[in-house]
Amino acid sequence: MLLIRCPYCGERSEIEFANGGEAHIARPADPMSRTDEEWAQYLYMRDNPKGLIAERWRHAHGCNRFFNALRDTRTDRFVMTYEMGRPRPEIDAATAAEAAR
């Protein structure tokens, strides 16, 4: 069983959570001035790295709050979670290497 640490409730089973997609995607300031191609880029195009990615998660069957997580896509390991509104943490080489295991 995969355990995910909610920053508000602590560690819980993965079945309590819902993925909300890539984190830190800024909405265009003036969406009406965007072309169809630019709007499609904003809505649908996301990174799909092999390694660490910042994602939004919701504790759907718990506190029902959103939070961000750094997850390694190669191992499905959560490196860390942090509250919404905080910037993406910088990860040093040691932490990235640990996540790859």
Image (tube, rainbow, N blue to C red):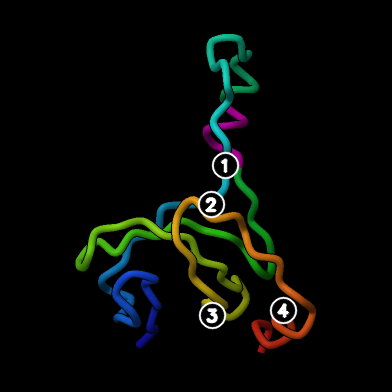
- Residue under pointer 2: 22
- Please, what is the three-letter code of the amino acid marked with disc 1? Ile
Q: Compared to 26, does 97 lie above or below?
A: below
Describe the element under mark 1 as helix, strand or loop.
loop
Query: According to the image, label 1 marks what residue?
Result: 25
Q: Are marks 2 and 4 in contact (CB under 8 Å)?
A: no
| SS at badge 3 | strand
| Residue that carries the numbered disc 3 in the rendered image | 77
Residue 83 lies left or right of residue 9; in this view the side is right
Q: Earlier in the sequence, mark 1 or mark 3?
A: 1
Name which residue lies at 33% across and 69% down: 8
Q: Is residue 7 above or below residue 83?
A: below
Under tag 2, what secondary structure?
Answer: strand
Whether tag 1 and tag 3 are in contact, CB under 8 A, the answer is no
Marks 2 & 1, CB-CB < 8 Å contact: yes
Q: Is residue 38 left or right of residue 81?
A: right
Side (left or right) of 8 relative to 32: left
Q: Residue furthest left?
A: 61
Judging by the rendered image, the residue that carries numbered circle 4 is 96
Give me the residue at 65% from left, 68% from top.
52
